[in-house]
Image: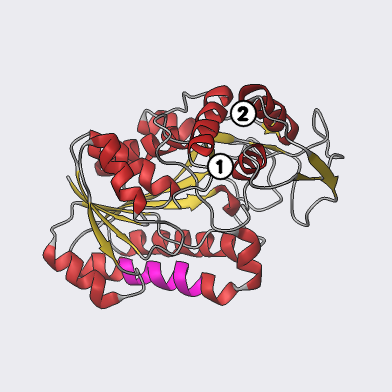
Amino acid sequence: MKLLITGGTGYIGSHTVVELLNLGHTIVIVDNLANSSTEVLSRIETITGKSPTFVHADICDRSALDCLFTEHRFDAVIHFAGLKAVGESNDIPLSYYHNNVSGSITLFEVMASHGVKKLVFSSSATVYGENNCSPLDESMPTSATNPYGQTKLMIENILFDLAKSDADWSIACLRYFNPIGAHQSGLIGENPNGIPNNLLPYVSQVAVGKLPKLQIFGDDYDTQDGTGVRDYIHVVDLALGHVKALEQLDNIDGCQPINLGTGNGTSVLEIVNTFKDISGQDIPYDIVPRRVGDIATVFADASIANNLLGWQAKRDLAMMIEDTWRWQSNNPNGFA
């Protein structure tokens, strides 16, 4: 298939591009490079022996997208592009709504005008809000507590309405839990701008000496060690979930939400201690007060992904952390 991958040089996008290229698909990436680097493209080529077509453009740029769809006859789109930092979204909400929601609407309109109505959308488990109990399943009510989560929820609702209005659309909304890890080659991995927002890149940057100390937000939750529990999934398993969703789009009528997670929870301290054991590095940390909106335990019910897509996560926590450490220790400054 010929596929358009928006945000394809980002963390999850680049790993998905690797898996798709290895399967022989023709890939065109469109990315504005706001959170990524063109160095990713050469790393992808080193891993796969193949080079995707790259277009430096923004999904909010209708004319650029229209030219792209005129030049290429795409079979489907995987839509990763978007701003993704929860904390930052509270500071600059208009940027998040403009980039994520308006940009997605522009993409969907251009897709429709060119008759491309097969889509895999990068959503998030943040759409489950704070009031559901784990394991979280796709039938539960949705809500959001920050602008980032609101954008994901708005886009999902747009896609549900779009699919209801036009039966030709086949859409998989993949609700990620907590992606970690890196490609086993150590050539690509998570490369956040500035101070990391997520646990694993923060831990790995402390381990490599780039940051002095980790902050753990709360140790008084009702969990086995008092720290928050989350469902961590290897980014390669996540990428393979996109491949499976793409392969099953012909069997999806309308818009189908699908959880991608392991179905298991791991605490912050379990992550820290496992990382110490695997890396051999000390991870100094301070316990600080809980963050507003954080809840004790979040993990997935991934049975729809298993039954509908034939997918399940296979890589365990040790492999997730081994691959994270290989990436970070080989690339202490990321792609710089």
Residue 98 part of the magenta segment: yes
What kind of element bears circle 2? loop
C-alpha span from label 1 to label 2: 11 Å
Q: Which mark is residue 177?
A: 1
What kind of element bears circle 1? loop
Looking at the image, residue 72 lies above or below residue 228? below
> How dense is the environment of label 1, judged by Cα within 10 Å: few (below 14), some, or many (20 and up)?
many
N-terminal-most mark, 1 or 2: 1
Circles 1 and 2 in contact, beta carbons < 8 Å: no
Magenta highlight range? 97-107
Specify whether residue 254 is in view. no
Specify whether residue 184 is in view. yes
Amino acid type at circle 1 is Phe
Q: Which mark is residue 264?
A: 2
Amino acid type at circle 2 is Asn
Q: Which mark is residue 48?
A: none
Quadrant location of residue 276? top right
Where's the N terminus, which quadrant? top left
The prevailing secondary structure element of the residues shown in magenta is helix
Residue 259 drawn at (x, y percent):
50, 40
Question: What's the residue at 49%, 47% (across, down)?
Answer: 334
Looking at the image, residue 266 lies above or below residue 162? above
Looking at the image, residue 316 lies above or below residue 29? above
Residue 105 part of the magenta segment: yes
Residue 10 drawn at (x, y percent):
41, 52
Left or right of 23 in this view: 207: right
Between 59 and 50, the residue placed more toward the observer is 50
Left or right of 144 in this view: 227: right
